[in-house]
Image (cartoon, rainbow, N blue to C red):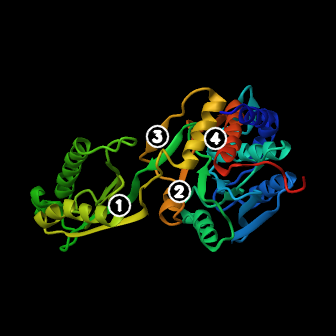
Amino acid sequence: MEQQAQEQWTTLKNAVDGDWIAQQAQTLVEIPSVTMQEAEICQTYASQLRGLGLTVDQRQVSSGRYNLYARLPGIGNGPSLMLNGHLDTIPIGNCVSCRREGDRLYGRGATDMKGAMAAMLGALRALKATDISLAGDLWLTAIVGHEEPEAEKDGPLTLIEDHKSGRVGGDRILIGEGWNELWVMSMGSMVFTIQLTSPRGGTHTTYVPFAENPIRFVGDLIQRITAYQAELNAGTAHPLAGAERIDLGMAQAGDYFNRTPVHCRLTGTRRWGPGVNADDVLAELRALAAPFAEAGQLDLSVNMTHEREPFETPSDDAAVRAAAQAHRFVHGSQVAISGKRIVGDANLYVNLGGVPAFYYGPSNDTAHADGEWVSLTRLKQAAQVYALTAVGYCGLASTRPDQ
């Protein structure tokens, strides 16, 4: 790195105010914002953005619930970067109350992901406080409707719609979620339900040999699923995310202790890598279950919900490389490049929005936990990485418009 660029990066890194970020993060965590109840947090975050001198586009998603879009304009022809995250949380449950203790901020949403949303504010604040100007636009977008299924991803889907219409920009999307590593790939995922239905209805178990009981065939199918996972383990593994997975979370059958069940259901998740789509996987599950339905003379249905196609943004993508350089400048070490079996909004942004996306967050270890907390040091470092990533990807302009 040239001496002048080194000095600019050092100036920007030092302009990030960790105490200010901690205060903003605590303000956000103190406000309950369970999915579908985000009205107050939306108004608070909009005020924080306006406090930085930014114009805020409040995009109504449903009554009282808004996606928030703000732009730090570039003054050249560089590419644009979107920093993105969600303001809603899972239900508070038995999570510890909001408090600061040493380097930790506790409370629901501290790590997932209000801390990162405050770090993004800190990145924009540092950029505005220095004489460093970007060539391309830097966007900050905060969405609702991420966590709970009842929202049906209305916030992310609205953002995709607005990006396609030109209401919001960004040639790349950096989501401030996850660990302080570059998470550039996620497997596809679906929730599947396999149902075996007995055409003859429920019958007293005394009159039905157990070998003909629908539950017996469910047991055989579970054994086949066990063997299938072994086959997946022995197959081609993704270099970042490993082997594909099939998992069961629910087994339901019967309504009385001595009556054969009419309906037997297995519900679980199936995760797959690039090169395969959800319809392919659904057909595969039907083929897997069909012999057992036929053997038991049972009707078969296999359905999927919450399907997400896999995504992968190349590690040599310009924005990913910019984030890697920023991490190295802040931490003095190479960043880890990772892939996950879990899915997130990047699966939607890439496959439905057509925008390359990836993740870099302060931490994720206590997400959804009763003892949720985030390191305040990590928040400051994440803000530094976000600001420097914007410089590296959007490019530098020599002067501000008013100079």
Secondary structure state at the residue bearing disc 1? strand
Closer to the camera: disc 3 or disc 1? 3
Q: Which residue is mark 4?
A: 111
Query: Total label count?
Result: 4
Residue 67 in the image, given as x and y percentages of width and height: 69, 63
Front label number (3 vs 4): 3
What kind of residue is marked 2?
Pro
- Counting residues from the start of the chain, the first of labels 1 and 2 encountered is 1
Q: Residue at x 81, y 36 (%)?
A: 15
According to the picture, the residue beneath numbered tag 3 turns out to be 338
Mark 4 against mark 2, which lies toward the viewer? 2
The N terminus, quarter of image: top right
Of callouts 3 and 4, the N-terminal one: 4
Does 376 appear above or below 50? above
Q: Distance between the Cα atoms at labels 1 and 4?
A: 29 Å
The dot on residue 192 is 1
Q: Amino acid at mark 3?
A: Ser
